[in-house]
Amino acid sequence: MLFVVALVACVPEVEGNAFVEPFDGATSVTVDTPLRVHLPALRLPEGQPVSPESLQVVDLDEGGFVEGERVVEGTTVLFEPTDGWRADTDYGWALIDAPDQARQPVLVLPEGLAGEALFSTRPGPRLLDAVLDGDDLCLVFSEEQPARILDLDIGGEDFFGTYWTPTFLAAIGDGEGATASCFPVPARFGEGDVVRWTSALGASDSTTIVEGALLEAWRARHRWSEP
């Protein structure tokens, strides 16, 4: 994966990791948190404006695009909403390859970074991923939460009373983290089975088990990529 900056006909290629914050699916995002697109090995001119078409944000509750400033600070492209984020609101955002602009730096996004994602200022954890990592089923939630008894259904079987010891997943950059827990499950469960979690307030989330590594699932939430 590469970030490429084109300045007229000069197109240097710089290798490095890339990721975004908040991570896809994050909840309880504070109202003053900017969106960040990290370009660790690539520097653009400080304060360089970024094409509005390259980073777009939508208020999913009221509809319409969110107004804000898009600038470069060091190795990071930031989006800061003009009036801050609204509390208890869901947002969608998209990274899109910007059109060429003569005599100005152009950000060309790698395939793994471009696309759509969600975050919310609304509080309350959501079940994001169920990853079968070896013999353990790892559940990833949208925000940090304490140890508790989980109300789970796995593959149509009741697993109410499962006690989990949470593992805090630190954000890859400076943003908020999430919580995961891994626990052994019988061999009859595997990829494609559905996990349903019901919160203490009665809200329910479902997701399908995929086989893989917990770390890779967490990186995918950040659109993390390496050269």
Image (cartoon, rainbow, N blue to C red):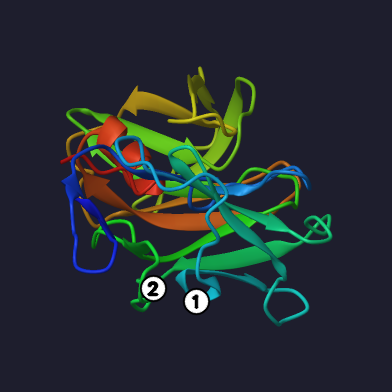
Callout 2 amino acid: Ala
Residue 34 vs residue 78: left or right?
right
Comparing 221 with 38, the one in front is 38
- The x, y position of residue 20, in whole percent, is 45, 47
- The x, y position of residue 204, in whole percent, is 60, 56
Q: Residues within 10 Å of mark 1 (few under 14, many from 20)?
A: few
Q: Is residue 6 visible?
A: yes
Q: Is residue 53 above or below residue 35?
A: below
Label pair 1/2, CB-CB below 8 angstroms: yes
Distance between mark 1 and mark 2 Cα atoms: 6 Å
Residue identified by numbered label 2: 98
Q: What residue is rendered at 66% in x and 44% in y?
A: 199
Q: What residue is rendered at 27% in x and 68% in y?
A: 8
- The x, y position of residue 127, in whole percent, is 52, 47
Number of numbered discs present? 2
Residue identified by numbered label 1: 53
Dot 2: element: loop
Q: What residue is rendered at 35% in x and 76% in y?
A: 102
Callout 1 amino acid: Glu
Comparing 179 with 192, the one in front is 179
Quadrant location of residue 184?
top left
Comparing 166 with 54, the one in front is 54
Q: Is residue 1 visible?
A: no
Q: Residues within 10 Å of mark 2 (few under 14, many from 20)?
A: some
- The x, y position of residue 22, in whole percent, is 55, 45
Q: Is residue 167 above or below residue 63?
A: above
| Precedes in sequence: disc 1 or disc 2 | 1
Comparing 16 with 203, the one in front is 16
Q: Quadrant of the C terminus?
A: top left
Dot 1: element: helix
